[in-house]
Amino acid sequence: MKLWAALTKETLALTRDLHALAALFIMPVVFILIMSLALQDTLSAQSAHKFSYLVDDQDRGALARTLQERFAATSGFTRSTEALAPSAALREHRVNFVLVIEPRLERGLSERARKPLVRIVAEPALAASVLALAQTQTELILAQLAIERLGRGIGVNLAGATDRRVAVAYFESAGVSRPPTAVQQSVPAWLVFAMFFIVIPLSTIFIAERDHGTLRRLRSMGASPGVFFAGKIVPFFLMNQVQAVAMLSVGAYLVPLFGSEALALNGSPAALALVFAATSLAAIGYAILVAVSAGSVAQATIIGGVGNILFGAIGGVMAPKFLMPQSMQRLAEASPMGWALEGMLDVLLRGAGVGAVAGRAAALCAFAAVCLAIAVVVFRYKRI
Amino acid sequence: MLDVHDVHYRYRANGPWVLQGVDLRVAAGEIFGLLGPNGAGKTTLISIIVGLAAPTRGRIARAGSMQRPALVPQDLAFYPMLTGRENLAFFGGMLGLWGARLRRRMDYGIAFAGLAPAIDQRAGDYSGGMKRRLNLAIGLLAETELILLDEPTVGVDPQSRAFILDAIRGLRTEGKTVVYTSHYMEEVEYLCDRVAILDNGRVLTQGRLDTLLTGDSKLRLVFGDAAPAEFLTSLARDFDVVSADTREAVLRTPLRHPLSRLMQLCETHNVEPARLQRGAKNLEEVFMELTRRSLRD
């Protein structure tokens, strides 16, 4: 009966806090929409981003045309239809680079040319890796053309001799896979962030109870801390599950309305439920620890908010983990938000089952247990 | 009903003593006033009596000790986002009440505190007086004989204060025992049968209110108009003057001369004696005599 009273009170208090509800539901929906749309070109596997270029053909021969055709057939680059002069197109950021084919290409290919046959002039911001890819593709095409020409000289058809014989595929399994799409990254990332955001309403309610003497009154009535905290854990746990279902629905039904792809569940629903439950326990444990440790609502808001942002930044919420350097990816393993996010990505992206995410769920539960244990010690020490 | 024996308390080992050998005896069915300035140790003593803290030394004995006393704290200790009814239901539930028993106690609290018109409004929207009444009603949910009221009228308007004081007086007719802390002596004078004055963690005095207020061997003379200086000089010559100014004089008894001499002196100096009191004083004066400072300091 005491637990029921505590559950009812906490549920009423939480559902009547409109600011908290806005933070728990509207904030992640907005982030999911913005980030899904903003990152869809960058992260979408289906429509990989292509870099645009112009050709400045100063040779105008048949070989130069073949070079252009073969370069256009490579993946990753799109020939621009800009009518601007190459230098103007680069200056105005209309293209990423210009392929300049020098005059007398055919002659240069048959001789030991000392001068470059093709120059690539790129905008300053173009990543070195992209530039290297364009250079490699061009070198390869020129090599193909040289070999074919050599074959023709000795009466052997060497066309296709340098065709690619290396097949490329993504290794698909839990923990290792191709990168997520924008919606696959955004939905779990901002869901995890929003679930941990319960630190704000939970600590606000708790500190108000402490400062207004309500805790003292409850203790005078013989209410045990166990009942009191259970009364907090259950409603916030349920609130987290509602958040999870709502954000998955946003990814599946709302995001597509704005032109992005829909979120699909590739793995086991039970595994996803397990990750949600473990994430929620971790978030509640952390929130209770902040609540009992902070001296005021302002302190709790700062500690909880900054803590969440740090957990999120380290854990791959703000910037996808696969875009981080190796050292930062290792650091992401230190963030409970990172464990939660990877657990959700395992299920949503990599088709994982319960067994595959059990380790991450256990880590999240252990984090919750440690936070709660410390919170109990602080609670007793401070004689709240 | 309640026996506080030699209670000492300090928050940390080697810290300053907050309570130093407090002895109190509260009889069943009485309203006992615990009077003292801020920081005197009243709330700490209440916390110990209710079981929120254990005395560092000494002991507390309660008749029917299985029964936990009800506490009405100084703070407005409820949830502003819940309605009055929801608050009562929650705290009743935390007391282990449910079903018809809970409804009965809620109805009692609502009627006792006059909350019915606003019971389904959010408590955060209540006026200051209504919040105090709700605070009181929550405290009275417990089915217990001993009720501890810790400054329950702080910051309320005179109308609500009068309502609350009358309601508390009504508890005596129900046979409840009340310990009432306050630094408003007029409240204590109005409500209490016996009082204890606490200061710096010590009980300075305790006893029946009428004894404390009359157990004095001084004579107070209040003047109708401002008394002239020559009169005060003559007064000091003929009587043992404890204090005197143009408005009143306090003389130590037994008087060195008969009372008629005093009246004669007044007549000689054209001083009109507006009031003559023997041993009558109020709690503020008792407190000032004991501590040399005002209750509201």
Image (tube, coloured by chain):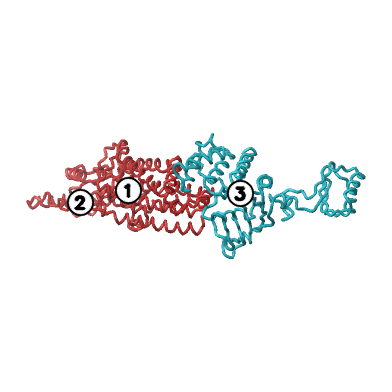
- Quick one: which chain is cyan? B
Q: Residues within 10 Å of mark 1 (few under 14, many from 20)?
A: few
Report the residue marked by disc 2: A169
Whole-number angstrom distance, CA of label 2 to CA of label 1:
26 Å
Q: Residue type at mark 2?
A: Ala
Q: Is residue A107 left or right of residue B260?
A: left
Residue A139 spot, x, y in % from top left: 21, 51
Q: Disc 2 is attached to a residue of which chain? A: A
At x 57%, y 58%, the residue is: B61
Q: Secondary structure at mark 2?
A: loop
Disc nearer the start of the sequence (2/1): 1
Q: Are marks 2 and 3 on the same chain?
A: no
Identity of the residue drawn at 75% across and 53% down: B215
Q: Where residue B227 sits in the image (x, y, percent)?
A: 86, 45
Q: CA distance from mark 2 to mark 3?
A: 87 Å
Q: Which mark is residue B29?
A: 3
The residue lying toward the viewer, choosing from A210 and A81, is: A210
Pick the front one: B135 or B65: B65
Which corner quadrant of the image does residue A261 belong to? top left
Q: Which residue is mark 1?
A: A126
Up-down: is A207 above or below B85?
below
Q: Position of residue B146 (x, y in %)?
A: 57, 50
Density class for disc 2 (Cα within 10 Å; few <14, some 14-19, many ≥20) is few
Separation of marks 3 and 1 at Cα, in angstroms: 88 Å
> Which mark is in front, 2 or 3?
3
Q: Nearer the viewer, residue A172 or A127?
A: A172
* Residue in front for this viewpoint, B279 or A285: B279
